[in-house]
Amino acid sequence: MSTTTLTKKEGAAPVEEPVLRKPSTRKRLVPYWLLLPGIIWLLVFFALPLVYQASTSVQTGSLEQGFQVTWHFQTYWDAFTEYWPQFVRSLLYAGTATLLCLLLGYPLAYLIAFKAGRWRNLLLVLVIAPFFTSFLIRTLAWKTILADDSLVVDVLNALHVLDVTSWLGWTEGERVLATPMAVVCGLTYNFLPFMILPLYTSLERIDGRLHEAAQDLYASPATTFRKVTFPLSMPGVVSGTLLTFIPASGDYVNAELLGSTDTKMVGNVIQSQFLRVLDYPTAAALSFILMAIVLVMVTVYIRRAGTEDLV
Amino acid sequence: MTDKTAHTGKNTGGGDVRLTGISKAYGSFTAVHPLDLTVPQGSFFALLGASGCGKTTTLRMIAGLEDPSTGTIFLGDKDVTDLPPYKRPVNTVFQSYALFPHMDISENIAFGLRRRGIKSVKKQVDDMLELVQLGDKARHKPHQLSGGQQQRVAVARALINHPQVLLLDEPLGALDLKLRRQMQLELKRIQTEVGITFVHVTHDQEEAMTMADQVAVMNGGRVEQLGAPADLYENPQTTFVANFLGTSNLIEAEVLETGSDVVVTAGGGKLRVPGDRCTSAVRQGGKVLVGVRPEKISLAHADDAGSIADGRNRVTGRIVDSSFIGVSTQYVVNSPAGAELQVYEQNIERDARLRPGAEVVLHWNPAHTFGLDAAQDIDAGVETVEDAG
Amino acid sequence: MRWLRKNLVVIAGLLTLAYMILPNIVVMVFSFNKPNGRFNYSWQRFSLDAWKDPCGVADMCESLSLSLQLAAWATVGALVLGTMIAFALVRYRFRARGAINSLIFLPMAMPEVVMAASLLTLFLNMGIELGFWTVLIAHIMFCLSFVVTAVKARVMSMDPRLEEAARDLYAGPVQTFLRVTLPIAAPGIAAGALLAFALSFDDFIITNFNAGSTVTFPMFVWGSAQRGTPVQINVIGTAMFVLAVLMVVAGQIITNRRKKTATA
């Protein structure tokens, strides 16, 4: 089609002058047509809701009389002062769970990437397989595992582990269920695959010869790990911690199923304010505060981790 | 750390690398058959062979990156067989270099020194960068360097440790031909300058012959032959060496007479082989493989057959192909003695009659003929298209 | 002792794996339990009752079928929109790339509860009735970013010369796309589809906020955690786990066999 228009032009204007041929308008618009539906979807159902939520957070009123925008920023302050323990708890639990995921996940990712040999695929399947059972069912299973008379709790008791954790305030007496430890344990469990998979991907990409080169250059296995393997796995560490921390900080399922009223996280508050109490402005403000905290923390974290010029 | 201190200074003592009865098996597959090898101190030693011949495995066993199934490795008088790689005074230049991508060039080069607890490395690193002519690239990351520059960094990173032995695993394999030639000379220069023993693994016979004082030709996990390049070329002991190192014309022949000159017959003609150049005992009526290098052969048109001096070995044939290479012309000749004989003629005075289809006589000095045991594959070590792919 | 030090990583890794698998084993074992009360948390005695009558609980199988339909439609929606975006991002230069990239990254960098709550405020303000459609809209929204990421990774690693080669060999734009581009991008698209299906099927938080009275399978499980957990939940969980593992194993065997016939 574009060729026919061109020949016509040439016929009409015999004067020869260098014409910079621009790609046809239709061709130039292709990427925009490809982007349009998806981007509109995201704008309408992701970005616009945030605007609505922002507006809701500065409204006052009641469910019966309706809510009006009154630029009532006081809601933020009230929400934060009332629920700051839940915020602190959320960040603490999510942070601890992320750290535990890293500590538990790294050896497994390392094992799969470097030591598994022909078992590699099987191990990968075993890491992903739990996904296929609904996470709620699996989280409920922890109720059985951590029940007061369960084997795990008996063993922990016999080893006097619970004495230590109770002294630290993580558990209460001889109980594990309905304590912070149970919630962190559940969070760690739920988000472990999100840590392991990026770690594995970045570890697997490391050229095995680099380990050999380090050893050849007088680095012991421990030094090889510290100076070569770990720095090279940083992209995996960064994305793994983000994929764990972000959802964990907003989670309310583990706190609800495995915790007690003393272990409520900010997600629980947002959920109950929105779905039970129906105090929309407070819920929206809480949700925004959480979003702001997470975004700031993530940005700072990426900045700091990113300064090392990740390869 | 303590066992390193002896080797931090420039090497004067030290000694040879000795492998005794070294072998490596992976399950039922034997990569290296029990092997004895001595690499003299200060020499440039090449392990030459096709891929999968066990040369790299041998090198990795010296480095400590592979545990030998049997045997002992000595560096000088010290048994290092059980030492992990990071405790051996040996360094490796890896195939495709294995430079640490997250460190810059000077950090890469300083890596070994730092691991040994040496604090002030700047001077040594600068000297090293100077030696490999990369002074201005100290702060670059490896991926910002060209292949040849990366290669030099890899050499510098290993050499800065003043190892007793430097191991080079196909260090030039990733470079293009011209750069490879340049780096061959460069490596040779560095070796002469620092005087460290170099053990170089390569599949490129020309590379091995240009650089090494000693070449061990490996095949199927065994050393086929060991010697100086010229000796290997002139006196191959097996068909593999004859074919793998350059090109050889091998003709199957029957022995007519034995003695100081062995007389054989092939395709109706008689050929003579010096008795001391036959690798196996020859007996009358037995078979022998007669070999001669293509460049030793002269080519005469059949019409001029009379002008060939007496006492030279002759084979008649017909040219089937000729290609002009520049310095020489390469002919392929079919004869009753053997098919597809190769002849390289210097382009000094070209005989216009020598074209495909022409009847010719190949003739050469019998002293340039060698005899090999007939009980082996006549095509061993010939590079075919399938092998290359 | 030396053995222990050498195998420390292996032991630690396998312990982690055990930690990850343990709940699935518990779920499986307790699918054969016959609990005394309404809750299936402590072992009483062996029984096959639940396996014989997996749909014996009111509304459970309905919620399961609803979740499967929802996941299927969400996958289709996210796949179509996401693949288009991915191709546009990799193959074309245009303005506002940075803004579009962040718009796609943000949903993944936000706690789910924030998206859930804000979407709910939108629906409430617009007066849209909550139900199947609001859930589907939400699922397509959060699956979209993951599909884009998966497909983009694959298309980016693709050698553009392959398409040039196809064009050189007389394939028109449509033919090039259908015969070269799409088959090569297929693994990325398949990965995106799997991810979207799994995310949608298992999603709870966003669904919890935007489903109204519609009950998906995760919602059913959540509700039963309050009211009493029927053994059939474990039956479904176990069946899905076993089915998925079998499918992976079967896929592995097929690819292995193909490889063998290819080399033979």
Image: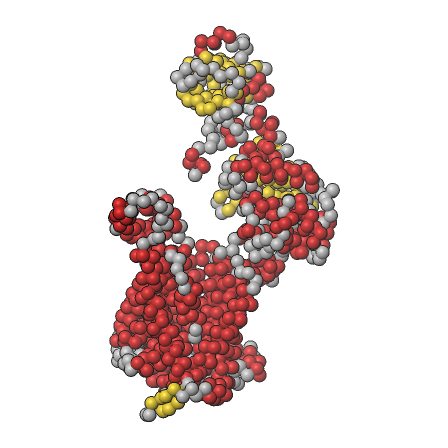
* Residue B205 appears anywhere in the view: yes
Q: Measured along the vertical axis of the image, is residue B178 above or below residue C261?
A: above
Residue found 51% across the figure and 55% down from its top: A206
Question: Which of the two residues, A278 or A232, is positioned nearer the viewer here?
Answer: A278
Residue found 36% across the figure and 70% down from its top: A42
Quarter of the view holding residue B37: top right
Q: Measured from the top left, where is residue B208 in percent x and y?
A: 58, 34
Residue found 31% across the figure and 57% down from its top: A25
Residue found 46% across the figure and 24% down from its top: B324
Q: How is the image coloured?
A: secondary structure
Q: Measured from the top left, where is residue B249 in percent x and y?
A: 49, 23
Q: Which residue lies furthest to the top in this view?
A: B306
Q: Measured along the vertical axis of the image, is residue C240 above or below residue A174?
A: above
Q: Residue furthest front?
A: A15
Q: Measured from the top left, where is residue B110 in percent x and y?
A: 65, 53
Quadrant where the C terminus of chain B is found in the figure: top left
Question: Which of the two residues, B172 or B40, is positioned nearer the viewer here?
Answer: B172
Tell whether B166 sits left or right of B308: right
Q: Measured along the vertical axis of the image, is residue B59 above or below residue C27?
A: above
Question: Which of the two residues, C232 or A73, is positioned nearer the viewer here?
Answer: A73
Tell whether B116 sits left or right of C59: right
Q: Measured from the top left, where is residue B337 in percent x and y?
A: 44, 18
Question: Which of the two residues, C135 or A218, is positioned nearer the viewer here?
Answer: C135
Quarter of the view holding residue A66: bottom left
* Residue A258 appears anywhere in the view: no
